[in-house]
Amino acid sequence: MERYEIRLSGSGGQGLLLGGIILAEGAISDGKNSVQTQSYGPEARGGASKSEVIISSEEIDFPKVRNCDILLSLTQKAYEKYGSGLKEDGILIVDSSVSAIKSGNIKIYSVPILDTAIKELGKPMVTNIVALGVLVEITKVISNEALEKAVLDRVPKGTEDLNRKALTKGYELARNLI
């Protein structure tokens, strides 16, 4: 059985709630079962926020992530709040601005996600898309084709080229690490 429990975390406004929806839709497009939940409210105003996705080849009987296999943290605050929920042999992907502590058999990937969105692409609003490209390229939880389709189905009309570039940058960042 193939099953992944994934938590995307950062600060409100970084687009990770949409990122979770895109990841879940990409999984469904790949023929897998998927469920997505999110935390918003006060978090949506700049505090730590999270979106959780479960992807499975079998039926999903409980929609909440208990201990995640994959954790993405774009801010130090989000890492500190949600980092303890990662399995001992999990995958941790952090923005290069985050100081992560190595423990157990966790694989840590430190990636300049925010800098890439802001400095290379000139648009902080594609941070989530760069992050998804990194996550999918490292973990292969869904295919790149399914991710691109889900991204293009969800982003505002007229931003497709920018979002394709953001995905490509995410893939490239990950390939440089693996």
Image (cartoon, rainbow, N blue to C red):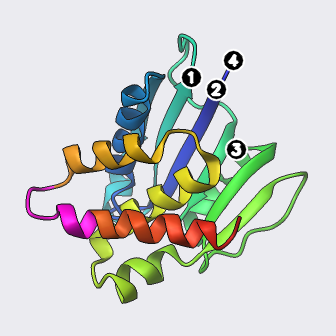
Quadrant into which the N terminus falls: top right
Q: Are marks 3 and 1 in contact (CB under 8 Å)?
A: no
Q: Which amino acid does label 2 sit on?
A: Arg
Q: Which amino acid does label 3 sit on?
A: Gly
Extreme-front residue of the structure: 145
Q: To which quarter of the image does residue 128 belong?
A: bottom left
Foreground mark, 3 or 4, reads: 4
Task: Residue at 89% x, 51% y: name it.
Answer: 105
Q: Where is residue 124 in the image (x, y as percent from the top left)?
A: 32, 76
Residue wearing tag 1: 56
Q: Vertically, is 110 above or below 35? A: below
Contact, mark 1 vs mark 4 (Cβ under 8 Å): yes
C-alpha span from label 3 to label 4: 22 Å
Task: Give the residue pinned by disc 4.
Answer: 1
Cα gap from disc 3 to disc 1, whole angstroms:
19 Å
Q: Is residue 23 above or below residue 11?
A: above
The residue indicated by pointer 3 is: 85
Q: Where is residue 23 in the image (x, y as percent from the top left)?
A: 42, 41
Residue at horizontal 39 percent and vertical 26 percent from the top: 28
Name the secondary structure under disc 1. strand
**Residue where numbered disc 2 is placed:** 3
- Disc 4 marks which amino acid? Met
> Which circle, 3 or 1, is nearer the viewer?
1
Q: What residue occupies the far bottom of the structure in this picture? A: 119
Q: Which of marks 3 and 4 is nearer the N terminus?
A: 4
CB contact under 8 Å: marks 2 and 4: yes
Labels 3 and 2 touching (C-beta < 8 A): no
Q: What stretch is highlighted in magenta?
A: 156-163
Where residue 22 sits: x, y (%)? Answer: 34, 43
The alpha-carbon separation of the residues under discs 1 and 4 comes to 8 Å
What is the C-alpha distance between the residues marked 1 and 2?
4 Å
